[in-house]
Image: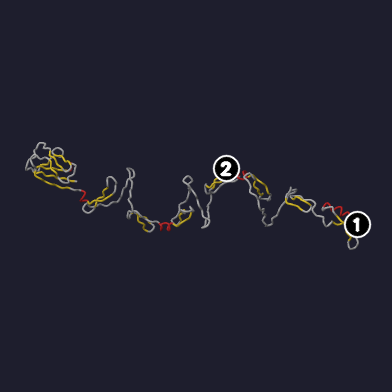
Amino acid sequence: MRKILLILLATAVGLPALAQRRTTRVIDNKGTIKMVLDSSSHFIDTAYNGLTELNDSTVILGGKLTQTTIIDINGNSLQIANLVSGAGTDSVVVADPSTGELKRVSASRLFGNLTAKNGLTKIGDTIKLGGALTEPTSIDASATNTLTINATTAGAIRLAGMTSGLTSDSLVVVDPATSSLRYISASKLLAALQAKNGLTKNGDTLELGGTLTRATTISTSATNTLAIEGLQSGSFATDSIVVANPASGVLKRVSASSLLISNETSFAAVTGTLTYAVTAIPADVTRVWVYRNGAKLVAGTDYTVNGTDVTFIQNGYTVTTGDVIEVQWVK
C-alpha cells in the first residue's frame, strides 16, 4: 500500500507541468488512497505559438509564433470575415508560390513590378486603356451587360490598325439614348436607309436620279469644277438649252429657237426727223443694222441706238422725205 501511495504522490507532483496544482485525495473501491485533480481544476497551463491565454479556461487566437507553422486547408477554403477597409499605405499579403509562406509587400513595390499589355498603358502607378493589342481580344457583352463608351470631342475614341472587313460583317452602332454599343447587319442597315432629294434607292444601291425635295446648291470653284462626261450630241430643232440665272445660279432651260431672236422693220423717213422708235430692238448698237435706201449705214458713225430709239447722225448724207429706212436686229 505504501508503495502505491508513493507512486501516486510522485505522479501528482509531476502534474503541474501539464495542469493546475490543485489536487485531492480519493479512495477507490479497493481502499487504495489516490491523488487526483480537483473537479474545479482546469487543464490549461500554457498557451504559445500564436495563441494567448486569457485565464485558466480561455485561450484566444493571437500571439507570437514560436515555430514554423502550416495550416493545411485540405481542399477547404480559408475565410476571414468582417475585414476592415485598408489604405493606400498598407502592405499587400502575398504567398510564396512554392511553399505557400505568407509575406507582405508594399503596394508601390507591387505596382512597380506590374506591366501593362494588350491594349493597356502603365503611367507610374496608373493603368490606362490605350495601347497596342498583342493578341486577339474579345469583350463579351449581353442585353443586360452592355458596353458604353462616353467620349467628348477632346477624348475621342480612335481605333488604329483595324483590318479590312467583309460585306458579311456587322456594323457597330451607338444607341442614341444610352450610348451603348451594339451591332447591326449591313443588309438591315441598308433596308432602313432612305433615298431622297435627287437620289434613288435600288435594292442595296443608291443611284443619282430622283425628285428634288428642297432647293439644292452645288458649290464649285476655279479648282473644283463640275464636269459631265459622255454627253451626246443634241439638236437645236428639238432640244432645249440649259441656262443659269446670273445672280442665283439657278438652272433653267429654254428652247433653242428662243435663244436667237431676230426681226426687222421698215418705214418712210421724213425730212427733219432724225429719231425713230423701233419696238423690241436690243440696246447694243452692234446688234442693230440700219439701211437707207438699200445702203447699209455704219453703226456708231451714221446712227446710234438708245433704248428703242434709232437716231441718225447724217454723216455725209441727209435724211429726206421718201427715204426708205430698213432696221434689222438680233438678240
Q: What residue type is labelled 2?
A: Gly
Image spot of residue 86 (x, y percent): 63, 47
Position of 285 with respect to 322 (left or right) is right
Give the secondary structure at mark 1.
helix
Position of 187 with respect to 78 (left or right) is left
Position of 162 with respect to 331 (left or right) is right
Give the secondary structure at mark 2.
loop
The mark tally for this picture is 2
Residue indicated by mark 1: 5
Q: Name which residue lies at 71% across and 53% down.
A: 71
Q: What residue type is labelled 1?
A: Leu
Mark 2: give few (<14), some (14-19) or many (20+) Cα within 10 Å. Answer: few
**Residue 148 visible in the snapshot:** yes
Q: Name which residue lies at 16% across and 38% down.
A: 300
Q: Farthest top residue?
A: 316
Which comes sooner in the sequence, label 1 or label 2?
1
Quarter of the rendering containing residue 109:
top right
Q: In front: mark 1 or mark 2? A: 1
Image spot of residue 169 (x, y percent): 46, 56
Mark number displayed over residue 124: 2
Mark 1: give few (<14), some (14-19) or many (20+) Cα within 10 Å. Answer: some
